[in-house]
């Protein structure tokens, strides 16, 4: 078990997304943190600059459409989260952490819900 609150860190991530707070969201990631998005093909974003490019437009969409926490629970070596955008589009995210208590990696993909274009994760 790590000496930081992994669940609390993901809740902070959710709060930053709800507020559209890009600076706070980026500060939650390790310097070499990465997001692998498997919603429309697989794309990897690594480091603060690429994460900023990825998250900037997403946060705008979240704040205008609505961002909801659906499910959060501990998983092997991290935290699993399911969130919704606009109350309908469900995305599953898996978080892994650095020893320093930052998000080291996140994988997002559409949650099982039928056929659609995820685009918002």
Image: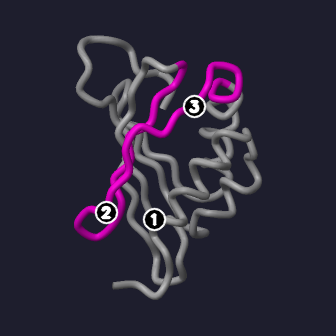
Magenta segment includes 70: yes
Are dots 2 and 3 in contact, CB under 8 Å? no
Secondary structure mostly seen in the magenta stretch: strand
Q: Nearer the viewer, residue 63 or 36?
A: 63
Q: Which of the 4 quarters of the picture holds residue 70?
A: top left
Query: Which residue is label 3 attached to?
Result: 67
Residue at point 42% right, 53% down?
A: 106
28 in magenta? no
Mark 1 lies on a secondary structure that is: helix
Residue 92 vs residue 55: left or right? left
Question: Residue drawn 61% across and 69% down?
Answer: 31
Q: CA distance from mark 2 to mark 1?
A: 7 Å
* Quadrant showing the N terminus: bottom left
Sequence-earlier tag: 2 or 1: 1
**Of marks 2 and 3, which one's residue comes earlier in the chain?**
3
Disc 2/disc 3 C-alpha distance (Å): 21 Å
Figure label count:
3
| Magenta part of the chain | 61-86
Q: Are marks 2 and 1 in contact (CB under 8 Å)?
A: yes
On the image, the x and y values in percent for residue 18 come to 66, 39
Return the x and y of residue 24 as percentages of the image width and height: 73, 56
Disc 3 packing (10 Å; few <14; some 14–19; many ≥20): many
**Residue that badge 2 annotates:** 74
Q: Nearer the viewer, residue 65 or 58?
A: 65
Q: Secondary structure at mark 2?
A: strand
82 vs 106: above or below: above
């Amino acid at each position: 078990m790590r000496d930081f609150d992994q669940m609390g860190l993901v809740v902070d991530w959710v709060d930053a997304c709800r507020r559209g707070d890009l600076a706070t969201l980026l500060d939650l990631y390790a310097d070499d943190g990465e997001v692998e998005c498997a919603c429309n093909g697989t794309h990897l974003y690594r480091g603060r600059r690429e994460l900023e490019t990825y998250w900037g437009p997403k946060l705008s969409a979240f704040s205008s459409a609505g961002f909801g926490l659906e499910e959060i629970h501990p998983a092997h070596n991290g935290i699993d989260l399911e969130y919704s955008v606009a109350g309908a589009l469900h995305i599953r995210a898996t978080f892994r952490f650095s020893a320093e208590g930052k998000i080291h990696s996140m994988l997002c993909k559409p949650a099982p819900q039928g056929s659609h274009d995820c685009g918002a994760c």
